[in-house]
Image: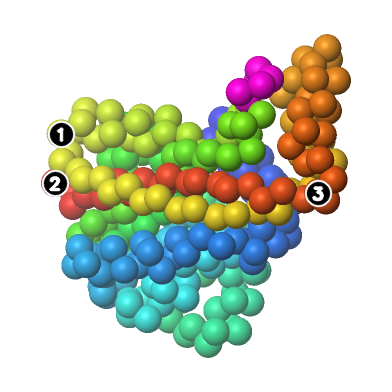
Amino acid sequence: MTNIKQENMAAEAYWDDFADDYVAIQEVSEIPLPQTIAAFLKAQHLLPADSLLDLGAGSGRFFGVFSPLVTNLIALDISAQMLRYGRQLAEKQQLNNITFSHAPWSSLADQYQVADVVFANMFGVPRDVLAMGQLSQLAKKSVVLGQFTARRSQLDQQISQAIALRSEPSVYTDQINQQRKLSLQALGQRFATKTFQFQTTESVAKALLLADLADRIKPDQTTALQRQLNAMYQKKPILLDRIDYTYELIFWQPN
């Protein structure tokens, strides 16, 4: 079995298993990401368009804003469970111009000009020179890639001033987009970027915060962390945490 097939099988299994939780998270998200991105693409005259390919479309987070702006919306995802949610959303909102494709994006490697616009949100797979070139050949007019590049928690920063916390692996990183930019430069492909800032608030119970931070401290820091949280919470059942997000678009017209 090739590495690509193994990676695809692992990705499919992961997203099939995570689908329920992912959809639940998106349902309570306060970030107006789809509306913000659609408005920007309209302002850049990238939309409306005849067709749009949504890579890693999943549960259809962008269906509601993209469907009215295109004649044909192609929703591709490696996960059948994620697409099941996407189909349910399309049916509920009566979005009748969506074509669903259950396949890895590598299945499009040899295809050309599949859609006017190729779009992907938080789809970190294409980043090297070969993949970025393949994305360009899929698009008739433009490629648009969006990625959250940073997440900053006010409570996290406050605690970090008193206790040294280990950094944790995160999907909120600019490493993916930095690699994409280098790959596009290697291809001689001109591109543009746009950065957006979002802010939300979350109610956080002390027990939940303590559990979340347990893996980011050394064993001998446990007492200090509990003391710090007691001082912050006092007798309050919850604290409000302000979360700041940075989101970056990379977009280009293929050479």
The residue range painted magenta reads: 160-166
Residue 115 in the image: above or below residue 215: below
Q: Earlier in the sequence, mark 3 or mark 2?
A: 3
Element marked by disc 2: loop
User: The disc labelled 2 sits on which kind of residue?
Assistant: Asn
Confirm whether the magenta stretch covers residue 27. Answer: no
Residue that carries the numbered disc 3 in the rendered image: 236
Residue that carries the numbered disc 1 in the rendered image: 188
Confirm whether the magenta stretch covers residue 163. Answer: yes
**Residue 23 appears left or right of 218:** left
Q: Earlier in the sequence, mark 1 or mark 2?
A: 1
Position in image of residue 53 (x %, y %): 38, 63
**Label 2 crowd (10 A; few <14 / some 14-19 / many >=20):** few
User: The disc labelled 1 sits on which kind of residue?
Assistant: Gly
Query: In the image, what residue occupies the spot 85% across and 20% down?
Result: 223
Determine whether label 3 and label 2 are within 8 Å by CB.
no
Residue that carries the numbered disc 2 in the rendered image: 255
Query: In the image, what residue occupies the spot 59% across and 70% down?
Result: 86
Determine whether label 1 and label 3 are within 8 Å by CB.
no
Question: Would residue 208 be visible to someone looking at this image?
Answer: no
Determine whether label 1 and label 2 are within 8 Å by CB.
yes
